[in-house]
Image (cartoon, rainbow, N blue to C red):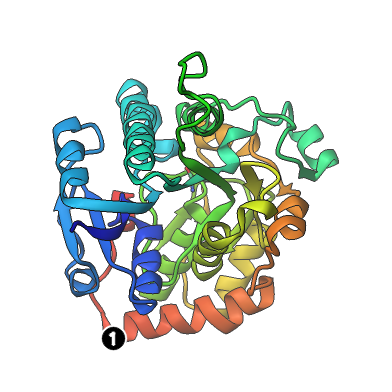
Amino acid sequence: MREQVILITGANGEIGHGLIRYLAEQNCPIVTLDVNPLDKALRPLVSKWIVGDVLDQILLGRLVVEHQIRTIYHLASILSTKAEYNPETAHRINVEGTLNLLRLAVEQSQWQGQSVKFIYPSSIAVYGMPSLEEKRRIGKVKEGEYTFPTTMYGCNKLYCESLGRYYSKHYRQLAADASTEPTVDFRCLRFPGLISAETIPTGGTSDYGPEMLHAAAQGIPYSCFVRPDTTLPFMVMPDAIKALVKLEEADVSKISQQVYNVTSFSLSAQEIYEIVMQAFPQAQITFEPDPRRQKIVDTWPEDVDDSAARADWGWQPDYDLEHAFQGFLIPKIRERYAHKPETIDIAKS
Ligand code: AKB
C-alpha cells in the first residue's frame, strides 16, 4: 500500500516553513519537494524530503508511484522582483511547474477515484492599478477587478489561476468520459505581502516590510527601496498558514469561487518605519526609493476586499495591525536574534 501523503512544493520557502510545522503538529504525513535540501530543522517533521525541480517530469512521475497524494500545496514560485531578471525562466518555473503539478493532481484524482485537493497561493501581484491616484481613490479591490498585472510573476499567477479553473472544471471537456472522471479540487488564495518572524522572503517586491524589521532587530543599516507613502496590504505568516489550511478544510459546498482574496491590515512604509523605530530606537533606516521597484508596487492595490472568503468559509485573521507587530513580530524577532546572533543576509534577497 502506498502511503497517503500531503505534497508541499517549494517547501524551503517562507510559507513552507510555517506550513510544515503546522501540519506536522496535526500528525499529517508530508512529502516535500524543493530545489534546495530541506532546512535541517524541518527534516524530522516530514516523511520524506526530495531535492528536485517542479519541471522534472520523471521525478514527479516517480513521486506518484511511491505515494498516494491527497493534497498538494504548490508553493514553488519565483517572486516578482527576481522574475524580472529572467522573465522566461520565471515563466517556465511558475507556469510550466504549475501545469506539471496540475496534471499530476488530475491523474492522481483519476487513479484514486476522488478529487485531489490543490491549494495554490496567488498574489496581489495579479492586480494592475491604472495610476497612483486611482489606486488611492479605489482602496479595496475585488477578485474580478483590475486584473492587469505588469510583472511576469503577476501574469504567471493570474494565468495559473485560470489553469487551475480549467483543470478542475473543463479538463478534456470534449472527451467521451470527461464528465465522469474526478478532476482536481483547485482552491486558490491571493495573498498580500507576508511577514514572518522566522524567515525573510527572497526576491519579492513587498519585501521592504519584513526586511526593515529584520534588519533593525539585527542592527544592520537598511535603505528602504520604496517611498514612505507606499501602502500595501500585509499579513503575518501564522495568518497565512491559517488561511491556507482553512481553505483546504472547507467543505466543498462552502466554496462559491475558486480564487479568494485574503488580507489582514494595510499600512504605509512610513508606518512600518515608525513601528520599527519605536521597537528598535537604534535602527538605521533610510528611504532610497528604487524607481523601477517602486513602479511595480505602485500597481498593486492598497487594500483588497476579502468579504467572499469571510462569507464562504469563515476567513478571519487572528492578527490585526497592533497584535501583529506588538504581540507577535517584535517579540518573536527579538527572541530570534537573541538566540541566533548570526545574521540573515538581507542583501541576498
Ligand atoms: C512579491 O513581492 O513578489 C510577493 C507577493 C506580493 O506576492 N511577496
Label 1: which residue? 339
Vertical side of 190 occupied by 97: above or below? above
| Residue 282 visible in the picture | yes
Give left or right: position of 3 versus 114. Answer: left
Give the residue at x 47% y 16%: 176
In the foreground, 185 or 193: 185
Name which quarter of the figure residue 76 lies in: top left
| Residue 281 visible in the picture | no
Give left or right: position of 64 versus 333. Answer: left
Q: Position of residue 188 (x, y in %)?
A: 55, 45
Q: Quadrant of the N terminus?
A: bottom left
Q: Position of residue 115 (x, y in %)?
A: 45, 45
- Tell me: is circle 1 under 8 Å from ligand 1: no
In the foreground, 178 or 246: 178
Vertical side of 340 occupied by 236: above or below? above
Give left or right: position of 279 versus 221. Answer: right
